[in-house]
Image (spheres, grey):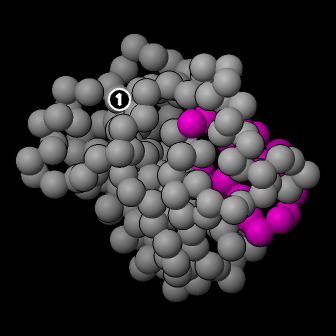
Amino acid sequence: MVYLSLGSNVGDKCQNLKTARHRLEETAEIRVVKASSFYLTEPWGKTDQDWFVNQVLAVETGLEPLSLLDTVLLIEERMGRVRQERWGPRTIDIDILLIDDRVINTDRLTVPHPRLHERGFVIIPLLEIAPGLVLPGRLPLQKVWENLVKNQETGCIKKLTCDKMSQRNIENG
């Protein structure tokens, strides 16, 4: 199983995630198996920007890891993603979190995602769709979450419904 995180904090954030998921599903060798709820989360890394809407997808794919990376980067580009500053605003961000129990370290791709264990906005939706998940060579994901909570490093994470009525609340954080 491959786990992808999706995030957006520009424009119609919920629609951006829905569009990214749709474009992933249009790819012949990618099948979305499970999708977490949407979560409204405060920015991480660079905090003086709009809040994000995040989601995690479990997908099956026949693509090799670097081909999958190329696919998600192309989707980001076609959705208007401009890489100007690290952790800056983005219409869409698609990160490869895990690929089965593989460990990959290349100049283009690191799996598991190197900051997965630091990001509550990824861990919570991942726990929602894969509650018993154990990271390769690490503690169970639940323990990783407990460590974040203990160290008070979770950030604000709110489950939400992405409909027209909630869009105003998303825009207001």
Query: In front here: 87 or 128?
Result: 128
Is 118 one of the magenta-colored residues? yes
Does 10 appear above or below 23? above
Picture coordinates of residue 106, whole percent (x, y): 86, 50
Q: Residue at x 45, y 17 (%)?
A: 47
Q: Residue furthest top?
A: 48
Q: Going 62% across and 28% down the picture, which residue do you hit?
A: 149
Is-magenta flag for residue 110? yes
Q: Secondary structure at mark 1?
A: loop
Residue at the farthest right position: 137
Is residue 34 positioned above or below 77 on the image?
A: below
Which image quarter: residue 73? bottom right
Q: Quarter of the image holding residue 49?
A: top left
Residue density around tag 1, few if under 14, some if 14–19, many if 20 or more, within 10 Å: many
Against 3, residue 107 (above or below) is: above
Q: Residue at x 68, y 73 (%)?
A: 1
The residue carrying mark 1 is 51
Q: What percent of the width, then of the height, locates residue 2?
A: 66, 68
x%, y% of residue 21? 41, 66
Q: Residue at x 42, y 35 (%)?
A: 157
Q: Decide if residue 129 is in sight here.
A: yes
Which region is colored magenta? Answer: 95-120
Q: Position of residue 111 (x, y in %)?
A: 78, 53
The residue closer to the viewer here, 75 or 112, is 112
